[in-house]
Image (cartoon, rainbow, N blue to C red):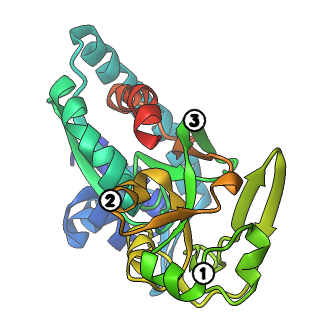
Amino acid sequence: MDQIQAIRAFARVVEAGSFTRAADSLDMPNATLSKQVQELEAHLGVRLLQRTTRRVTVTPEGQDYYEKTMRILRDLEDIDTSLSAARGKPRGHLRIDVGGSTARDVLIPALPDFIARYPDIRIDLGVSDHAVDLIGDNVDCVIRGGPLDNSSLVARHIGNAGMVTCAAPAYLKQYGVPAYPEELKNGHRLVSYVLTQNGRAVPFRFLHQGEKTEIKIEHRVGINESNAHLAAAVAGLGIVQTFAYAAGPALKDGSLVEILKKWRPAPYPFHVVYPQNRHLTHRLRVFIDWLVESFPARLG
């Protein structure tokens, strides 16, 4: 038995809460992972995990073993990181999650620079607007906009995105151009961005001479993915509020027209977020530093 490998397998089951999710995150067969944990339990002579048909729970002995072995695994990571840093060549695998339009318009166009600087880092990019479980899904970091509501995560600010309110020319020809935010309540059709976490529509927000206005009316269409949200506006389904970087090309070619410019919303903060109990490896550290350097200008 490779004890270090078995400990890593056990730790992933604890973090993921299931053998299947742990096996998927480690890219190994479920049977192999289960065998490694069983061999570890046999070696120790204690039950680390309590298995039922529905879920896996950690025994008191397993929780104690997890906490102690995680310190060892972090020490090993420190040794690897110090040697890697001494060579100046961070290496390894980074799992990053990012929203759809941010991936398309900001991160992916910038990635060639990062890869050129750090050719020994391999990246797996998860692209969706769904919230992910950083521990359970074995994700190193996520890039997200908006307020942060999870104190168990560490966040670093990487810039602010401008926001615009816009619609297709055909829509504005049919329904008219609102002169101020309150006019949106007079028969206009809104295409709302809907949060995947709770199904709630994000209200339309405006800022003028330091005064904030929030419009909450029933939307005609709600969409929970940023690229599709923008596409709905281009198709003439209604008015949207979205990131200036996402709407930029459509505004430039005339597919969309910005409205209510005097009431542009406040800039939208973006952060890179990672688990508090996840060791900050050399490869993750250089990626975060690169984001802080590269993102602000691209967010616009």
Q: Distance from label 2 to label 1 (Cα)?
A: 39 Å
Q: Is residue 85 above or below residue 119?
A: above
Q: Is residue 251 above or below residue 87?
A: below
Q: Quadrant of residue 198?
A: bottom right
Dot 3 amino acid type: His
Of 63 and 150, which appears nearest the observer?
Answer: 150
Disc 3 on helix, strand or loop? strand
Q: Residue at x 27, y 47 (%)?
A: 108
Mark 3 or mark 1: which comes first in sequence?
3
Q: Position of residue 222 (x, y in %)?
A: 55, 84
Q: Position of residue 40 (x, y in %)?
A: 34, 54
Q: Distance from label 2 to label 3 (Cα)?
A: 20 Å
Dot 1 amino acid type: Gly
- The residue wearing badge 2 is 126
Q: Quadrant of residue 168?
A: bottom left
Q: Nearer the viewer, mark 3 or mark 1?
A: 1
Q: Position of residue 166 (x, y in %)?
A: 53, 67
Q: Name the disc covering residue 176, or none.
A: 1
Mark 2 or mark 1: which comes first in sequence?
2
Mark 2 or mark 3: which comes first in sequence?
2
Instruction: Specify whether 274 is left or right of 41.
Output: right
Of 25 and 126, which appears nearest the observer?
Answer: 126
Disc 1 on helix, strand or loop? loop
